[in-house]
Amino acid sequence: MKQGPNFKRIEDNMRSGPLAAHQFLGTDTRTLADVILHDQLLLEPLGLTNQDISDRMRYFTDKLADNPGPKNADHKFRVEREEHKGRILCPFADNVQASKSITRVTNMESGKTVVWSDLNIHLIASHGFYEGYGAPFRVDPAEYAEVLEIKNPK
Ligand SMILES: [Zn+2]
């Protein structure tokens, strides 16, 4: 997919600018626009939106707002939070910052665990960006939907 000059600049920042250390695009060689488009195509058959995914992630993260846990949620999930000092700037140049703290949720029925940073929630909610293949904080929409039991609200 062709991407506009803004996306090109953001992609360059992710790959070689001051934010490159966060490896938002991992080992992915696709353009930023393609990475975003491909994940939207993964969501479609699931009947889910970026909002459904990010709301569910925020739901768990908010459970540990005053206490890092671990805590049980809904008799099925184990939720833990790893506090990290410092903040990360959103690579989409909108002046949003998020803490580096991490939320880890285990589905106790399946034994599967998924992890995300506070910035992931913003990247998904505001930019539809789940990060590239090989990124340390890649959120695979289908995998997260399964582990967090995110249902089509309709
Ligand atoms: Zn942003």
Image (cartoon, grey):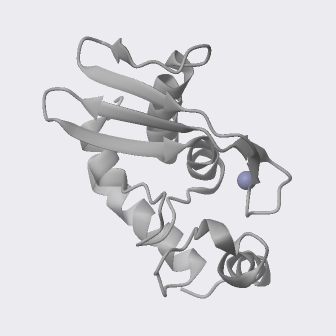
What residue lies at 51% left-to-right and 64% top-to-bottom? 131
Across and down, in percent, residue 52 comes to: 45, 37
Do we see residue 151 in this rendering? no
Q: From where the camera sits, is residue 31 visible?
A: yes
* Residue furthest right in the image: 95
Q: On the image, which quarter does residue 80 sit in?
A: top left
Residue at 63% x, 47% y: name it: 119
Residue 104 image offset from top left, x and y in percent: 41, 36
Q: Nearer the viewer, residue 151 or 87?
A: 87
Q: Position of residue 28 (x, y in %)?
A: 46, 81
Does residue 137 lie above or below 146 as drawn? below
Query: Does residue 5 lie above or below 26 as drawn?
Result: below
Q: In the image shown, does 117 or 153 lie closer to the viewer?
A: 117
Determine the residue positioned at 60% across, 18% down. Answer: 65
Name the residue nearer the viewer: 141 or 74.
74
Q: Is residue 27 left or right of residue 140?
A: right
Left or right: residue 112 compared with residue 31: left
Q: Residue at x 68, y 79 (%)?
A: 11
Q: Is residue 133 above or below residue 122?
A: below
Q: Is residue 145 left or right of residue 129?
A: left
